[in-house]
Image (spheres, rainbow, N blue to C red):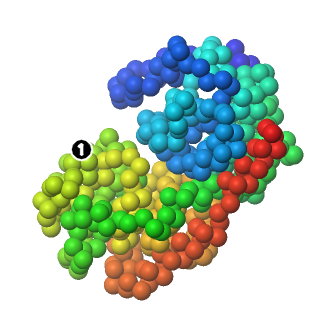
Amino acid sequence: MFILYDLIFIISALIYLPIYLFRRKFHQGFLARLGFLPLDLKLNNPIWIHAVSVGEAMAIKELVKELKRVYPTKKFVISTVTPTGNKIAQRLVQEGDFVTYLPLDFGLIIRHTLNKIKPSLFIIAETEIWPNLITQLYRRKIPVILVNARISDRAFFGYRKIKLLLKSVLEKISLFCAQTDRDAQRFQALGAPGEKVKVTGNMKFDVTDYTDSKKDYTDYRRKLALESKDRLLVAGSTHPGEEEMILGVYKDLLNDFPNLKLLLAPRHPERAQEVANLIKQFNFEPLRISLLDSANWEFTNSRTVFILDTVGQLINYYAIAEIVFVGGSLIKKGGHNILEPASQGKPILFGPYMFNFRDIIDLFLIHQAAISVYNIEELKRKIKELLDSPTQAQKLGQLAKDLILSNTGATKRNLELIRELTP
C-alpha cells in the first residue's frame, strides 16, 4: 500500500512542481520539508507538535505553555506548513526548542526526519492525516495524539471515499481529542476505535490573548490617527473578491457616516500591494500598517484605508474596532476564526460561507451573539443598523464575549488525557 502511496506522491509532485515554481510557493523553509535539517540538531527525544498554519499555531499556545510546565526537562519541536504559521510558532518556543516545517509525506523523507528528531510524543493540532508519518511513528512506538480534532463537512465527504484505506491509519493514532460530538462520531464512522475518541472541546476558546482585558490598546488608535469621533470598521482575513465588495459597502456608508474608517486585513499579508491597488481604484489612499510608526501617524487623512500587512497583530486592531467583519465568508472559502473579535466584545458580522467553523457559528447564532448576512446589500444594511444603534452593537459584543468565557477548558481536558497516556 505504501509503495503505491509513495508512487502517487512522486507523480503528484512532478505535476505540481511547475505550478509551485510559477506561483513562487517555495520558501526558505522548503528544504526542511525535504528532510534537510541542521547537522548539529540534538533534541533528546522532544515532544513534537504540528500546527499547519496560523489558526492552529494560535490554538496550541496555551497547550504548549502547560506541557512545558508538566514536562519541564523536555525540549519541543513545533512544525507548520505555512510561513505565516511558522512565524507564530517562533513565538511559542524557548531556547533549545526547534521550529521547522512538516516533512513531505514521502517514506524516505519521513524516515530520515524521524531518525534525526527522534520524538517521544507527536501531537497534531486539528486534523492532518499523513499515512506515512503516522505509520512510521506507530512502528517506532511513538504515541500520536490529535488535539482540537475536527472533520469539516467537505473533509468528511472526501474521507468517506477512502474509508477502507483511512481506517488502518486511524487505528494507529493513540488518542483523538475531538472538538464536538459530531466530530467524534465522524472519526468513529471512518474507523477510529471508539475507546480512543474523547470529546474535549475547542482549544481556541482558551487562548488567553483573547481575554486580556488589562491590555491597553490606546496606542493602536493613536497609530492610525483616529480621533475620538472616528469609528473603525475592521474586515479581517479577507480573500480576493471580498475586498472589492467591502470597499463598495464602505464607500456607500461614508455618505451617512463620514467619520467611519476602514482597515482591511487580507488573510495572506503578501497580497498587500494587490489590495493597495484595489483601494486606489475606489479613489481611496492605501496605507500599510507596517509603514506606520509613532513619528508619521499624523499623515493619514480622510481618504485613507488601512491595510494590515503584518502577522499576529489582527487582534490588536479588532480591539479598537467599532464593528468587525470576518472574511473568507462572502466567497466560498469557509470563513475564519470569529473568536478573536468576540473576545474583545465586538459586534461581529460574516457572510453565508462559514462552513469550516460550523459548530462555532451555530453556537454564536443560537445565542444571538453574531450576525450572518447573505450578500453585500444585507452587510451594508446591518452595519448601518449597528452604527445607528451603539446600544445594540454593545449588547451584541457583550453576548459574544460572554460566550467565549462560558466555553473555556478544552486545553486543560486535553492536557489531562495526554498525561494519562504519557505519564
Callout 1 secondary element: helix
Q: Nearer the viewer, residue 143 or 170?
A: 143
Residue 404 lies, in percent from the top left, at 58, 67
Against 359, residue 277 (above or below) is above
Q: Which quadrant does the C terminus fall into? A: top right
Against 51, residue 409 (above or below) is below
Against 256, residue 147 (above or below) is above
Residue at the spot 53% in from the left edge and 38% down from the top edge: 93
Q: Is residue 263 visible?
A: yes
Residue 327 lies, in percent from the top left, at 42, 57
Q: Which residue is mark 1?
A: 273
Residue at the spot 39% in from the left edge and 27% down from the top edge: 27
Q: Nearer the viewer, residue 1 or 231?
A: 231
Q: Is residue 55 left or right of residue 26?
A: right
Q: How many marks?
A: 1
Residue at the spot 39% in from the left edge and 55% down from the top edge: 314
Badge 1 density bin: few <14, some 14–19, many ≥20, Cα 10 Å: some
Q: Nearer the viewer, residue 205 or 380?
A: 205
Against 64, residue 254 (above or below) is below
Q: Is residue 188 left or right of residue 40?
A: right
Q: Residue furthest right?
A: 195
Q: Is residue 13 visible?
A: no
Residue 244 lies, in percent from the top left, at 29, 56
Residue at the spot 78% in from the left edge and 21% down from the top edge: 139
Residue 353 lies, in percent from the top left, at 50, 58
Q: Which quadrant does the N terminus fall into? A: top right
The type of residue carrying mark 1 is Gln
- The part of the image, by quadrant, that contains residue 45 is top right
